[in-house]
RNA sequence: GGCGGAGUAGCCAAGUGGUAAGGCUGGGCUCUGCAAAAGCCCCAUUCGUCGGUUCGAUUCCGACCUCCGCCUCCA
């Protein structure tokens, strides 16, 4: 079955059959603050896409930009009386830490807007646009893209600017621009910018947001991309602008496939600081949720459907992952002494295990893919209960999981919890009491261990102890 | 106003012109000194509303209702 994805450009499911490495550009964060979980939903969708393409045998050259100069970063740096670069550095580092926590596979490159070679690339593009009449310098000294010079403007968002122009002209007076929808390529320096600015043929200033992505995408991936991703709110005007800039410079189609993920909502509402439902990754970690659990929640819903983020959802994720962990532990124990190295299992009973990957082939149908995982868990547990699962099958399942996990990245955390001496001593005492069938003492020791923050569970042969989580 | 997305069991969420995947919660059972854990089993005559097409629609068409997003730099 071929890969097929929904293309924002055509609003249709399209077959995707790339030849050679896939050139993929993903819009990254503006590093003026800690990224919130809504931002990470988009990055997670992109991670899932990259991982699935790679499992399907493709090489993915992915670039993610870091916007480290714009109104918000300048405002933030000014507020803290820090140089811009120092201010943004902190949030860049935080971003990479968060990405690792969510197990996001690193991109090939993370170009920053202020890198000298990127500024140079932007200036070069603007120059070409000026020469070809696609851009002009206005009275405010800023350089703007002339959208009337690009007839395809609006094709991605499916907006007809001609139709909107009449109502927009009315308030046009206050702008230096020829048309309200013209967007800035180069913003002339003003006092707010302080020490921030670069020399250009149009005077001191800084790049507009859209030209960043165009220039960096072209510099690192070439004139034509296979896939360009982002959140739906980037469709207009950001991606529309990128198309305009690139295609006016190169004369070639900028990106073949545009993929956008829907927004994340919190408790059914838009996430906002004032509503008090604003979550960063770190705020959730502080509350005791793990990166893996948050990854599961953000990945669990198809990328084009709005995701309603709730604490109940996190709880459900925790339970689902626990079920997965128990299954893996069971298979690992069962195969522990087994020397056979069985190949990846394709089928278990009537379950077709490859359908996990086939579900993802269809526009990343994660729900159907996860259903395969849970069907498999139930079926193999059933067989284990009846002692009907062979060692070869168990190993084959583990191999299958290994492949599945390359996409999901949901393997359990390695248990690094060190058992305190006090607890292990009590466990030894309890073991003895149990051997003597001294239940009263056994229960007393269980309570005592619980007070130290550990809970004991008795299995057939041994005591299992885990740190209690709250 | 323009463009776009969504409404499926208590919650989350797939899916198909032919009679509803999966996860969580809940209930039952097995195991167990007890407890817990774990595993298994069960849980929508019904898919926002009303019409239409059809032998048959949750799935196609039309209208309507509700929610959400974008429309000057928020993923």
Image: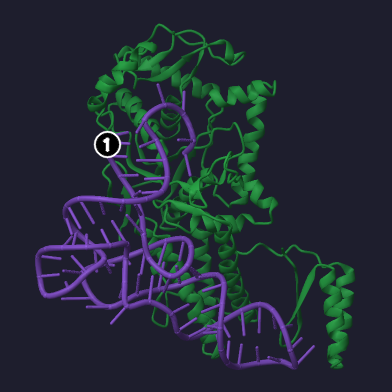
Chain colours: A green, B purple
Task: Tell me the residue at 88%/86% (across/down).
Answer: A441
Counting from the top left corner in percent of width and height, residue A464 is at: 75, 77
Q: Is residue A180 left or right of residue A423?
A: left
Task: Tell me the residue at 55%/41% (across/down).
Answer: A272
Residue A329 lies, with reference to residue A102, above or below; the image says below
Counting from the top left corner in percent of width and height, residue A199 is at: 52, 11
Q: Is residue A95 left or right of residue A47?
A: right
Q: Is residue A106 left or right of residue A121?
A: right
Front-most of A336 and A342? A336
Residue A364 lies, with reference to residue B39, above or below; the image says above
Q: Is residue A82 left or right of residue A158?
A: right
Q: Which residue is mark 1?
A: A158
Task: Tell me the residue at 63%/75% (across/down).
Answer: A329
**Which chain's residue wears label 1?**
A
Counting from the top left corner in percent of width and height, residue A39 is at: 52, 43
| Label tally | 1
> Can you see residue A339?
no
Residue A344 lies, with reference to residue A53, above or below; the image says below
Counting from the top left corner in percent of width and height, residue A147 is at: 30, 21
Label 1 Cα neighbours within 10 Å, binned few <14 / some 14-19 / many ≥20: some
Quadrant of the image containing the C terminus of chain A: bottom right
Quarter-wise, where is residue A327 in the image? bottom right
Front-most of A218 and A13? A13
Quadrant of the image containing the N terminus of chain A: bottom left
> Can you see residue A270?
yes
Residue A173 lies, with reference to residue A356, above or below; the image says above
Front-most of A67 and B37? B37
Secondary structure, mark 1, is: loop
């Amino acid at each position: 079955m071929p890969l097929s994805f929904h293309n924002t450009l055509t609003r249709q499911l399209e077959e995707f059959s790339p030849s050679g490495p896939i050139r993929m550009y993903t819009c990254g964060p503006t590093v003026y603050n800690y990224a919130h979980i809504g931002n990470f939903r988009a990055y997670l969708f992109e991670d899932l896409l990259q991982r699935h393409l790679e499992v399907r045998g493709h090489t993915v050259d992915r670039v993610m930009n870091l916007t480290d100069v714009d109104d918000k970063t300048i405002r933030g740096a000014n507020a803290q009386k820090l140089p811009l670069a120092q201010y943004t550095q902190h949030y860049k580092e935080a971003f990479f830490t968060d990405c690792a926590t969510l197990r996001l596979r690193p991109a090939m490159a993370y170009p920053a807007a202020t890198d000298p070679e990127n500024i140079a690339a932007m200036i070069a593009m603007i120059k070409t646009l000026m020469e070809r009449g696609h851009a002009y310098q206005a009275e405010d000294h800023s350089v703007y893209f002339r959208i009337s010079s690009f007839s395809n403007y609006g094709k991605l968002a499916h907006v007809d600017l001609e139709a909107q122009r009449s109502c927009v002209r009315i308030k046009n007076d206050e702008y230096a621009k020829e048309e309200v929808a013209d967007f800035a390529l180069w913003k002339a320096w003003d006092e707010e910018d302080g020490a921030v600015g670069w020399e250009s043929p149009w005077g001191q200033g800084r790049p507009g947001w859209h030209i960043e992505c165009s220039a960096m995408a072209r510099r690192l991936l070439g004139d034509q991309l296979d896939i360009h991703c982002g959140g739906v709110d980037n469709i207009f005007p950001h991606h529309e602008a990128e198309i305009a800039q690139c295609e006016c410079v190169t004369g070639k189609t900028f990106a073949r496939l545009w993929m956008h993920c829907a927004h994340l909502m919190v408790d059914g509402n838009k996430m906002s600081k004032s509503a008090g439902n604003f979550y960063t990754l770190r705020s959730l970690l502080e509350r005791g949720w793990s990166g893996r659990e948050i990854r599961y929640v953000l990945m669990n819903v198809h990328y084009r459907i709005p995701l309603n983020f709730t604490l109940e959802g996190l709880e459900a994720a925790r339970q689902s992952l626990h079920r997965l962990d128990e299954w893996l532990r069971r298979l690992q124990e069962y195969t522990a002494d087994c020397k056979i190295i069985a190949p990846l299992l394709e089928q278990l009973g009537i379950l077709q295990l490859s359908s996990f990957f086939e579900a993802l082939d269809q526009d990343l149908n994660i729900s159907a893919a996860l259903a395969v995982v849970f069907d498999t868990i139930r079926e193999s547990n059933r067989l284990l209960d009846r002692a009907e699962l062979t060692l070869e099958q168990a190993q084959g399942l583990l191999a299958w999981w290994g492949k599945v996990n390359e996409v999901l990245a949901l393997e359990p955390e390695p248990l690094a919890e060190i058992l305190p001496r006090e607890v292990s001593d009590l466990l030894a005492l309890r073991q003895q009491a149990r051997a003597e069938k001294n239940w009263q003492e056994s229960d007393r020791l269980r309570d005592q261990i619980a007070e130290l923050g550990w809970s004991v569970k008795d299995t057939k042969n041994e005591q299992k102890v885990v740190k209690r989580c709250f």
